[in-house]
Amino acid sequence: MEFSAYILTRQVVNLFEWVLAWRGHKRQLRLRLRKAKTYEEWIKIAKELDQYMGFDDWKENGDDGYFDYTLVRPSLSWYYILADRTGQESQENSAQDEGC
C-alpha cells in the first residue's frame, strides 16, 4: 500500500513538473540538451541551464542546503592535487616509454 502511494505521489510530481515547471527559456535549454550532438555541446548548454536556474550560486558563496561545503572543500582540494600528480606521472611514464 505504501509503495503504491509513493508511486502515485511521484507520478503527480512528474506531471506537475512536466506541465508547469518546464516552460519558456528553461524548456528551450532542456530541449537543446536533449538534441546536443557532442559532450562538449551538452556541457555548454548544461552550464547555461544551471546558471539560468541558479544552481551554480553555491560556487560563489559556498553555501548549500544539501551539503556542507566546508567539509567538501578539503577533499576536493586533495582530489585535484592527486589528479594533477597522476597526470604528471602518466606523462613522465609515456616520455620514458618513448625514449626506450
Image (cartoon, rainbow, N blue to C red):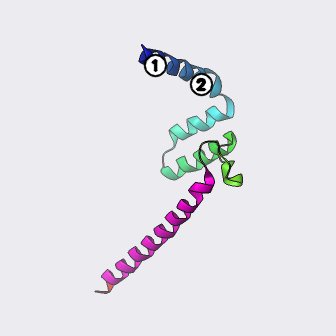
**In the rendered structure, which amino acid carries the disc numbered 2?**
Glu
| Label 2 to label 1: alpha-carbon separation | 15 Å
Give whichever of 33, 37 is nearer the camera: 33
Q: Are marks 2 and 1 in contact (CB under 8 Å)?
A: no
Residue 31 screen position, x and y as percent: 56, 35
Magenta stretch: give its range: 68-97
Look at the image and tell me in which quarter the N terminus lies: top left
Q: Residue furthest bottom?
A: 99
| Dominant secondary structure, magenta | helix
Counting the numbered discs, the total is 2
* Callout 2 secondary element: helix
Q: Is residue 8 left or right of residue 93?
A: right
Q: Assess disc 1: are there few (<14), some (14-19) or many (≥20) residues with their C-alpha within 10 Å of its C-alpha.
A: few
The residue singled out by tag 1 in the image is 7
The residue singled out by tag 2 in the image is 17
Give the mark toward the camera: 2 or 1. Answer: 1
Q: Is residue 45 left or right of residue 90?
A: right
> Is residue 76 within the magenta segment?
yes
Residue 23 screen position, x and y as percent: 65, 28
Residue 61 shows which numbered tag? none
Q: Assess disc 2: are there few (<14), some (14-19) or many (≥20) residues with their C-alpha within 10 Å of its C-alpha.
A: few
Residue 58 screen position, x and y as percent: 67, 49
**In the rendered structure, which amino acid carries the disc numbered 1?**
Ile
Q: Point out the tag, 2 or 1, that comes first from the N-terminus.
A: 1
Which residue occupies 53% across, 60% down? 75
Instruction: State whether residue 32 is above or below residue 99.
Output: above
Which residue occupies 51% across, 22% down? 10
Look at the image and tell me in which quarter the C terminus lies: bottom left
* Callout 1 secondary element: helix
Give whichever of 68, 83 is nearer the camera: 68
Instruction: State whether residue 53 is above or below residue 2.
Output: below
Which residue occupies 31% across, 81% down? 97
